[in-house]
Amino acid sequence: MTETSPAPVRDDPEGTPAAVPAIELAGVRKSFQAYGETVHAVRDIDLTVHEGEFFSLLGPSGCGKTTTMRMIAGFEDPTEGAVYLHGEDVTGVPANKRDVNMVFQSYALFPHMSVFDNVAFGLRRRGVDKAETRKRVGAMLEIVDLTGREKRRPSELSGGQQQRVALARALVNRPRALLLDEPLGALDLKLRQAMQVELKRIQREVGITFVYVTHDQGEALTMSDRIAVMNDGGIEQLDTPRAIYERPASRFVAGFIGTSNLITGQITAVGGDGAEIGYGEGRIVVPLNGASRAVGDTVELTVRPEKIVIGGERPDRGSYTSATVAEVVYLGTSTSYLVTTAAGDDVTVFVQNATNADDIAERGSRVWLSWEPRHSYAIGTA
Amino acid sequence: MRRLKGAVAPYLLILPGGLWLVVFFAVPLVYMASVSLMTGNLIDGFEQTWHWRNYTDGLDVYGDKFVRSLWYGLIATVACIALAYPAAYWIAFRAGRHKSTWLFMLLLPFFVSFVLRTIAWKLVLTDQGPVLGPLKSWHLLPKDFHVLDSGFAVVSGLTYNFLPFMVLPIYVALERVDHRVVEAAYDLYAGRFAAFRRVVLPLSLPGVFAGVIMTFVPVTSDYVNASVLGGPDNTMIGNVIQTEYFTNSEYATASALSFTLMALLLLGIFAYARALGTKDVLEAAGR
Ligand SMILES: Nc1ncnc2c1ncn2[C@@H]1O[C@H](COP(=O)(O)OP(=O)(O)OP(=O)(O)O)[C@@H](O)[C@H]1O
Ligand SMILES: [Mg+2]
């Protein structure tokens, strides 16, 4: 990637899916028995990951991401359902017989081996000859920028370097898919961002399917071709980053993906391409995208904070409502306004600090919020 | 003033332990070293004559006892590893919630006096005891078969008595092996054996190393097992030292023998540490 300003959202045109998906989970469920109780870690997941895709599993802590990953890697057997790798049913096949490799949440490098031996481990187990091993390890260390550190022990490396060893150790085997469990979780913000770019570059260079686990929505949005948002063991939505960001399928997804404003109201009129909601002294129009809704139905809609405009005058078109500024937070490049609408919803508004923005509104002042109807989205009307 | 205090504090902290070591370890050691070069006897008294022959004579007369002690020590240590490793492995990885129970069971004999334990072992191995008795009455063994008063009896007693010193360090090392690292080995195409051979075993070698030092030294200088289980023909250097000191009152000879034994043990341990205690060995084991 030629890194110009990294776009917050990637949107790949629906790539032509390979005939056989790289990874397929069919009706997979996993329960654990812990202290006499049954924990449903994963409930009835169906998903397909295409060949060469950067696929992310995103969700809050404990939602079952690692468990899903471990079933793909072969460390856990599903309680129910089947796992397919490249069309082949591998349910019950042990990890060392699966052509996928995993980068562990904690790296799990071999502490008693040098960087070289760590990376060579998989090749040696498969009986690759010495010369070939040396060549491939050398080439891989070059890709992850660790040439010259072959003799070091993992404990003699920085966190970022250890991370890259873990990556090299898995990639050198040229697996057909690479599973990464929060590989950047232990790194500080700066290094994390650098490694995100790095990972993306490596993935493109080697062309391997990546399944990436994270609970950082920003990371998932910038890196993935598609994302599965998980909650409580199930998949809430599986789509491209843009679709997930702009058309969240549920209240949970809307809340989990970045800051999102949720506004609830009742439909007062339906017509044309949308519905009108009476909202305090304002008026809200929201597109229905072909979904059927009737007058009197309650709708939840989302508006992104950066799409809302703050003004002093009552607008006469689009969606608008009056509100009171509760808090003003200066964020450097932008200012965040926390406002309470006349109907009582709390709404966040981001304003870029490009112009003289500090006189837009003060704490406690009454303002008008407005946005274009096409920038709002009624949940569940994909 | 503050600075001075800061500089002095560490020395103050080691003062009690240091004093203890000087009074009860260093001083007697120097005294014994001096005795080892004296001549004389209990009645006429001992005199410092720098009699180095005490050392050469000791090696001449008791050389075979030294060799036997080192040999017994070696066999017992190896036997301890062979018994302790699987036990420690099983407790660390397979015993689940009952880890501490099993560990406690292994250490239970420790709560009984060392001598008493050895005598109990003698009762177990005696000619008509619970092991040999039934085997003989079923004609699985000849009537005159015996175990006691043999090198085998001594080594088995030593192995039994010092087993916990081997189990504990190995257990601690195995317990510390990160199971995610083992999973990583499986993920990288290692089967059960390769994962053990390349990852678990090398990571537990420091424990084996510590266990060897902790068993080999006391086993080699032990005299209780040889005197209770070995009979007159299997005495070890520890028995010689004990007899020279307490029975014959040959303090100079006893001291010289002790120092020779100490030197041999230190030499052995250093050679062993040089050969095995380096990180290169662990690294080679993982390759
Ligand atoms: N071996 C196990 N025994 C019992 N419960 C388990 C086991 N492994 C996972 N769980 C439970 O399954 C659920 C999902 O766990 P999982 O590790 O997949 O979460 P996660 O999404 O990876 O979370 P995080 O982001 O914190 O890593 C959790 O409630 C967890 O407590
Ligand atoms: Mg996890």
Image (cartoon, coloured by chain):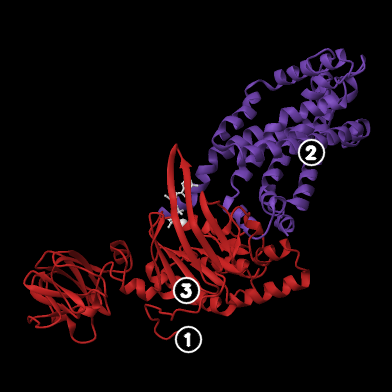
Chain colours: A red, B purple
Q: Which residue is mark 2?
A: B78
- Residue B107 place in picture, x, y as percent: 63, 28
Number of numbered discs visible in the structure rendering: 3
Chain letter for mark 1 = A
Dot 3 falls on a residue whose secondary structure is helix
The reply to whether callout 2 and callout 3 are in contact (CB within 8 Å) is no
Please determine whether, in this image, residue A269 is positioned above or below residue B237.
Answer: below
Q: Is residue A281 left or right of residue A48?
A: left
Task: Tell whether circle 2 marks a residue whose Cβ is less than 8 angstroms from ligand 1.
Answer: no
Q: Is mark 3 within 8 Å of ligand 1?
A: no
Q: Which mark is residue A2?
A: 1
Report x, y in % for residue A31.
47, 47
In the image, B64 versus B104, the foreground residue is: B104
Could you tell me the amino acid type at mark 2? Val
Local SS, label 1: loop
Ranked by sequence position, the earlier of labels 3 and 1 is 1
Instruction: Indicate which label's residue lies in the foreground, 2 or 1.
Output: 1
Secondary structure of the residue carrying numbered label 2: helix
Q: CA distance from mark 2 to mark 1?
A: 62 Å
